[in-house]
Image (cartoon, helix red, strand yellow):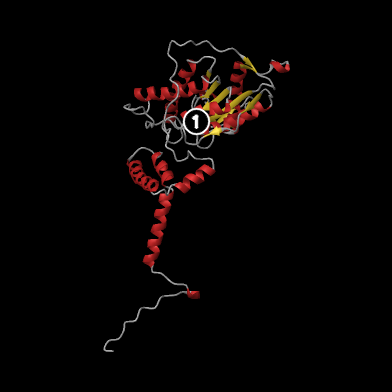
Amino acid sequence: MTAERRRRPRRRTGEGGRRLHSAGSAIVVSLAGLLIALLLNAPGLHKSAAIQPEGWKRDAALAVTGLLESISGALLIDRPRRALKAVLGRSNDDEIDTAVALPEPPADDAPATPPRRETFTPTRKLRVWIAGDSLVVVPGESILRAITGNPAVTPVGKIDGRIASGLERPDVFNWFTHVRAQMQKKKPKAVVVMLGGNDDHGFMTGLPEGREVGSFGSSSWRTEYRRRVATIMEAIVRNGAFLVWIGLPNTHDGEQTDRYDVINAIVQSEASRRPGRAAYLDTYFFFAGANGGFAEYIADETGKLVKMRADDGVHFERPAGDLIAKKVVEHLQERFDLTSWSGSS
């Protein structure tokens, strides 16, 4: 032979005879795995992008994840995730539901006759549902403890608290469809709601086609937010339930407190249009200091200073929850007869 046959390079092997691959091969495999993972979770990634604050980052994330979701759906790669969500009872997790589709509020000339005062007993219990954003959790726990001693009252499930939710962003959590579904499913006769703590911004989703909303507190913003508050109230009272809406408290941030005042004014106004069916509980002066502003500590009935507000200057400590619960129960007792069954008043 005039030329030597070229020898193939020996395969690199590791300990135990394992075949070794180049760094480039490892990178390709890693990228392929990452792409598959992105496609498998594309619906969840797209919803996560949709609920981000308004801005160019959200727009870019929506564009990328929207493309991934389209590819995932076309290749049926999203099926495993959908199946797993269905097994866990969370089929709607990936849906971006922005529908504000509840009954329209009553006309200004609608009859405002308060309903009769109903009586409840241990054999016919008042069913109470407590729901809202993170602010409702501590007062809600106090309400549950407060009503435990009365066998004529019973809660329908645990506190339905949804962190970072509100009426501005149904794409984050849609209270409009949720309230309607829970009223039909749980059939409560009394509902305690606290919403709005995350709504002091100007960005809204779920707007009717062709409608635009200005900055927070503008005339267009107030009109749309009033519509949303009214539809939540209507979804409750039209199902025959009495609503107690807990107002937002003052906070350590004066500007935030001013924004909360805007929200509270709308809620209070809408509740006043539904006498005997909805009540607004003003919490502002519960937690005001000697100068009328925010106070972390408030003197109790004995004059002892008690920590009422959480360290973030917004949420509540247990004593504050107990104070709110006492006022909520007073509203329920005014609207319903919960004690005559026992011979007490």
Q: What is the count of numbered marks? A: 1
For residue 8, above or below residue 228:
below
Q: Secondary structure at mark 1?
A: helix
Pick the front one: 294 or 18: 18
In which image quadrant can residue 106 be found? top left
Q: In the rendered image, which residue does mark 1 sit on?
A: 178
Which image quarter holds the C terminus?
A: top right
Q: Position of residue 213 (x, y in %)?
A: 34, 27
Pick the front one: 71 or 329: 71
Q: Position of residue 305 (x, y in %)?
A: 60, 30
Most extreme residue toward the right, as rendered? 343
For residue 7, above or below residue 321:
below
Which image quarter holds the N terminus?
A: bottom left
Left or right: 159, with 103 as reference point: right
Seen at 39% across and 48% down, the residue is 72
Q: Position of residue 113 (x, y in %)?
A: 52, 10
Left or right: 340, with 128 as reference point: right
Left or right: 60, with 303 as reference point: left
Residue 302 seen in this snapshot: no
Seen at 38% across and 69% down, the residue is 22
The crowding category of the residue bearing disc 1, from other C-alpha atoms within 10 Å (few below 14, some 14 to 19, many at least 20), is few
Q: Position of residue 47 (x, y in %)?
A: 42, 41
Most extreme residue toward the bottom, as rendered? 1
Left or right: 319, with 60 as reference point: right
Query: Identity of the amino acid at label 1?
Result: His
